[in-house]
Image (spheres, rainbow, N blue to C red):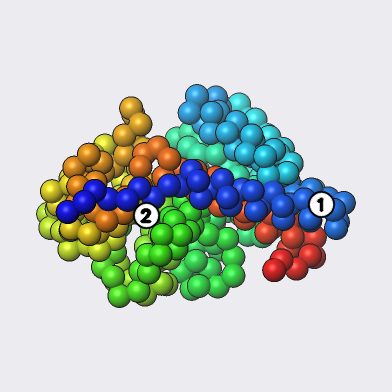
Amino acid sequence: MSQARLMDGTALARRIIEETGERAAGLTERTGTAPCLATVLVGEDPASVTYVRMKQNRCRTAGITSRHVALPAATTTAELVDTIEALSADPGVHGILLQHPVGEHIDERAAFEAIAPGKDVDGVTFASFATMSFGLPGFVSCTPGGIMRLLDAYRVDPAGKRALVVGRSAILGKPVGMLLLGRDATVTYCHSRTRDLPAAVREADIVVAAVGRARLIRGQDIKPGAVVIDAGYNAGNVGDVDFDSAVERASLITPVPGGVGPMTIATLLEQTVEAAARQLGVAEG
């Protein structure tokens, strides 16, 4: 069997950001208002600072105004909720991103729920999960949404296929499973208490690895011809899938880095422009 084709998230994300930039420019010209994304960062975690800076740079590329709110690490839940509620009420802000993690002393869910659903461009609120699950208009969680765009770009139709999601986080594992289910896949969730994970992997036509454990999924367990989406990112630029062995059995596979990661940011920016269009009363095609 030949090696798997790489699913190039970097190239696809670049195209999406270019299209998003054109839409943002058109919206700005029509309304006199540029789409605005507010990013909220609690503390100075180096990785989080880097992610936020990357998102700000991509915003500039796409013609989106970026408003950054930096809060001290000692910020309380109440203070963070107040900050987010103020942004939710600000007509000059169209999308809100709370960079996580926020610190163990903060009730992250309470902070997420302070984001107005119409500005939840990262897809983290209960409202967004509900619309994703019911297939209603709304904003998807960015990484799951990016994964679905990758599948579409490579003409992978989930209908009728066995899809395995390894991981059950509220913003990745759970929502990507619901999106796959909405596309008529037969979805199985696995997690830290799953018995005999390799057996589940061997049955899957589509594998989404999203658990945060380096090289957990072994190539020898991949069903020949399966599509492998590695949404994990671990120290040393290593994903949740053992790439070198998996590439010998899969038909399509995402690299780490350069697969799912760029698609997450592209989806965030795309949804920010969509949010701005809705709030400014401009119909999007």
Looking at the image, do the residues carrying marks 1 and 2 touch, with CB atoms under 8 Å apart? no
Quadrant location of the N terminus in the rendered image: bottom left
Quarter of the image for residue 147 reads bottom left
* Residue lying at 53% horizontally and 28% vertically, measured from the top left: 50
The residue under the point 24% across, 53% down is 250
* Image spot of residue 260 (x, y percent): 43, 47
Q: Please tell me how crowded label 2 is: few (under 14), some (14-19), or many (20+) other residues with Cα within 10 Å.
A: many
Which of the pair 222/141 is nearer the observer?
222
Residue type highlighted by circle 2: Gly
Q: Mark 2 points at which residue?
A: 173
Q: Where is residue 27 in the image (x, y as percent from the top left)?
A: 79, 56
Label tally? 2
User: Of all residues shown, which one is farthest toward the front?
Assistant: 2
As helix, strand or loop, the secondary structure at mark 1 comes to helix
- Determine whether 231 is above or below 73 in the image: below
Please tell me how crowded label 1 is: few (under 14), some (14-19), or many (20+) other residues with Cα within 10 Å: some
Asked if residue 199 lies left or right of residue 188, the reply is left
* Residue 28, label in figure: 1
